[in-house]
Image: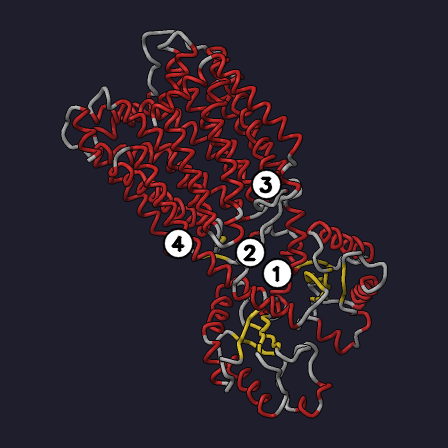
């Protein structure tokens, strides 16, 4: 393998090869710009479902569509609120809006609306909240319209009400359609903000670190070239329907792309400068640089690629759809790190470092004083260094057992967003369960007869369901009058083919809270016993639950399954990669264990900050998995660079001296790279969703902990303890590899 990297180093470092590589990248950009669209044209927000569409809630939704077909699409909830109570003037304005929504002038993509203005006063009063401060009107959007069309229609409704509203009545739009519209609005300009913030931050940090204009600009130019290629490849893949491109994935991918490429540039720039001080020829210096760095960069990128590819094993759509976006990006990033970056610096040579041009000198560059002290400390007092850090990290990791997770997407929205404000108004002034009732479908294989016996069975079934904890109400109330008077049957109670009955459950808890999910899980698990207690044969009948709570329960179960699977696969695969790279089982296990400890400590410390200091009672259920994938994959990079340098130094020095030199000579560049990587993830703090805010903050903390504490102190301290007595380096390596 090393021979292959030497050949690649020779190719990228000779004048002809470097020019050919640079030309090839430019040709690829031009070609893709002509034949491929940008990824944003085909990107969308992945729905919280299974890639196999086989979850219990999906099955229930299919039955709903089959037995109770509707031309309506997403529901929007129009919420009107006045703290002192809805007035007569308010009602007049609401009547005018209702008239408009049922007229021919209503927005094009609105299918239907509750005709509030035509309702009797008694019915209007029943729609008001008990405290008379809030009123709710449902509207249905047309089926299969795009997110942009949904956003456009709801905007028209808001504008129309603003024209009518003369006395400051609060008006919000929530529900599935409102959430979809707000998601579009939130991310309308988010990518531009993210791009400029990332580029500006990296530029400032590189200028501070190197004080050289070219060394600050080149990494950004390389990242720009690579981003254009990745963006077009993703657009081509999405257009050809080879894979799905997720909006959130492309945003995070852009941050990672700029950060990782900057890291590779830092590693190459630092080692190239070291070689230029020893070697007169810029081509020979680059060949030596890439001979040493080619393998670490390849393994570094390979571990990230493997981590991203494992996402394909997920059944949850948002996780699964991250895989192609990041896998394509990592492949191109890796190719750039091995070819484009060294070729550019080969052609520029010493000029790239202006005004601090490295001069040919027999002495190597003076080691970083801070990291020289750290190197001495970890080799002289490894037990003390390792023990102190292990206590701190394990103590932080223990906070994991007190973490709470939220499956309510609304909690991730900003406080001032209309769909969240509308949802919270409903939560405060209406029974919690009415926010999203659960639909229950009793399906039969034969045609149902509404006779006395079946009515008794239905009554037993509803009574049995009511006995379950967490159930507030079940509608409709079963009546024996329906037998003699079929006209009294509630609308959509029995399906047209008379093979299904639909009931509605109102839960006691917020439909998105964990307690509501637990209630529905209990209903599913007890479905057979509920049928048996109602004298309904489980062979002929089946119970199905549809609605938001049912969908979120499936999300929770898919998340649990995918989290366990991903944690296991990524840990095993990366350990195998490290085994190949280090040629030592002990080192591979040590590296992966310290990375896992770093992850656990970061998440535990993060929860302590978010809960005790920021006041969050829960965090997004996705945060642990996303943080794990990125922290473990990216955290391996710096460990590989450190261990590779220690292995290199161990060919000429005793083991502890090799560790000291490895820490000393890689400390400066790795800490600089870590700071830039952490800062770029901090850019996600500018994003409007709480989920992205916490992800960026957690990643930044994790990278700092991993860079300075785990990679800088803990790992080399334990490595120093692996060989107790000073021995010749060849013997030391033999012992480590055994």
Q: Residue at x 36, y 43 (%)?
A: 573
Which label lies toward us, 4 or 3? 3
SS of the residue at dot 3? helix
Q: Are marks 3 and 2 in contact (CB under 8 Å)?
A: no
Residue identified by numbered label 3: 237
> What residue sits 71% from the left and 75% below the top?
126
Label 4's element? helix
Q: Which residue is mark 4?
A: 564
| Contact? badges 4 and 2 (CB < 8 Å) | no
Q: Quadrant of residue 423?
A: bottom right
Q: Earlier in the sequence, mark 3 or mark 1?
A: 3
Task: Examine the image and state in which quarter residue 67 appears.
Answer: bottom right
Q: Position of residue 565 (x, y in %)?
A: 40, 52
Please give the residue where the numbered disc 2 appears in the rendered image.
48
User: How far apart are the two marked residues, 4 and 3, measured between alpha carbons?
Assistant: 29 Å
Q: Quadrant of the N terminus?
A: top left
Determine whether, in the image, residue 383 is placed left or right of residue 626.
left
Give the CA separation, mark 3 to mark 1: 40 Å
Residue 671 located left or right of residue 419? left
Residue sitting at the far right: 104
Report whether 270 appears left or right of 231: left
Q: Residue 544: where, in percent of width, then height?
A: 55, 72
The secondary element bearing badge 2 is classed as: loop
């Amino acid at each position: 393998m090393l021979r292959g990297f030497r050949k690649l180093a020779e190719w990228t470092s000779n004048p002809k090869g470097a020019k050919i590589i640079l030309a090839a990248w430019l040709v690829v950009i031009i070609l893709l710009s002509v034949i491929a669209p940008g990824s944003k044209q085909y990107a969308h927000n992945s729905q919280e479902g299974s890639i196999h569409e086989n979850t219990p809630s999906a099955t229930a939704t299919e039955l709903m569509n089959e037995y109770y077909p509707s031309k309506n699409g997403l529901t929007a909830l129009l919420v009107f609120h006045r703290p002192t109570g809805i007035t007569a003037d308010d009602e007049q304005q609401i009547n005018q809006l209702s008239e408009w929504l049922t007229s021919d002038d209503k927005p094009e993509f609105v299918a239907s609306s509750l005709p509030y203005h035509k309702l009797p006063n008694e019915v209007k009063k029943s729609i008001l909240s008990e405290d008379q401060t809030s009123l709710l009107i449902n509207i249905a959007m047309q089926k299969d319209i795009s997110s942009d069309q949904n956003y456009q229609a709801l905007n028209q409704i808001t504008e129309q009400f603003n024209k009518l509203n003369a006395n400051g009545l609060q008006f919000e739009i929530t529900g599935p359609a409102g959430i979809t519209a707000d998601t579009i609005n939130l991310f309308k300009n988010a990518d531009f903000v993210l791009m400029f913030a990332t580029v500006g931050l990296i530029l400032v940090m590189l200028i501070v670190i190197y004080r050289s204009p070219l060394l600050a600009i080149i990494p950004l130019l390389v990242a720009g070239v690579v981003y254009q290629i990745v963006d077009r490849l993703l657009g081509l893949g999405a257009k050809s329907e080879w894979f799905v491109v997720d909006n959130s994935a492309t945003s995070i991918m852009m941050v990672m792309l700029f950060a990782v490429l900057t890291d590779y540039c830092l590693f190459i720039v630092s080692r190239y400068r070291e070689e230029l001080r020893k070697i007169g020829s810029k081509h020979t210096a680059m060949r030596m640089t890439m001979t040493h760095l080619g393998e670490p960069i390849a393994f570094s990128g390979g571990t990230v690629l493997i981590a991203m590819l494992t996402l394909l094993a997920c059944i949850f759509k948002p996780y699964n759809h991250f895989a192609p976006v990041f896998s394509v990006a990592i492949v191109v990033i890796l190719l750039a790190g091995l070819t484009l970056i060294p070729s550019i610096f080969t052609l520029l040579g010493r000029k790239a470092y202006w005004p601090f041009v490295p001069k040919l000198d027999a002495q190597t560059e003076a080691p970083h004083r801070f990291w020289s002290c750290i190197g001495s400390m970890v080799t002289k007092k490894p037990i003390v260094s390792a023990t102190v850090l292990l206590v701190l990290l394990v103590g932080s990791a223990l906070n994991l057992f007190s973490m709470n997770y939220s499956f309510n997407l609304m909690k991730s929205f900003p406080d001032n967003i209309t769909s969240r404000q509308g949802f919270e108004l409903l939560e405060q002034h209406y029974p919690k369960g009415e926010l999203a009732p659960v639909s229950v479908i009793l399906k039969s294989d034969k045609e149902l007869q509404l006779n006395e016996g079946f009515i008794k069975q239905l009554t037993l079934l509803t009574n049995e369901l009511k006995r379950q904890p967490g159930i507030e109400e079940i509608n409709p109330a079963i009546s024996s009058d329906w037998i003699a008077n079929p006209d009294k049957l509630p609308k959509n109670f029995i399906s047209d083919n008379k093979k299904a009955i639909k009931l509605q459950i109102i839960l006691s808890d917020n439909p998105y809270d964990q307690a509501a999910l637990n209630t529905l899980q209990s209903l599913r698990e007890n479905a057979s016993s509920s049928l048996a207690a109602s004298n309904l044969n489980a062979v002929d009948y089946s119970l199905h639950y549809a609605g938001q709570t049912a969908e979120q329960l499936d999300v929770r179960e898919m998340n649990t399954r995918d989290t366990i699977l991903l944690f296991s696969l990524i840990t095993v695969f990366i350990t195998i990669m490290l085994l190949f790279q280090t040629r030592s089982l002990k080192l591979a296990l040590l590296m992966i264990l310290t990375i896992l400890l770093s992850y656990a400590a970061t998440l535990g410390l993060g929860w302590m900050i978010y809960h005790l200091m920021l006041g969050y009672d829960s965090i997004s259920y996705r945060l642990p998995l996303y943080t794990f994938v990125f922290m473990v994959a990216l955290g391996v990079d710096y460990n590989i660079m450190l261990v590779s340098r220690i292995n290199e130094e161990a060919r000429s020095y005793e083991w502890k001296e090799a560790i000291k030199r490895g820490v000393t000579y890689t400390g400066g560049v790795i800490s600089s790279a870590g700071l830039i990587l952490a800062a770029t993830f901090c850019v996600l703090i500018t994003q409007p969703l709480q989920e992205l805010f916490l992800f960026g903050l957690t990643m930044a903390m994790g990278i700092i902990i991993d860079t300075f504490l785990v990679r800088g102190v803990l790992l080399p301290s334990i490595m120093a303890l692996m060989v107790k007595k000073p021995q010749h380096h060849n013997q030391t390596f033999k012992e480590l590899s055994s």
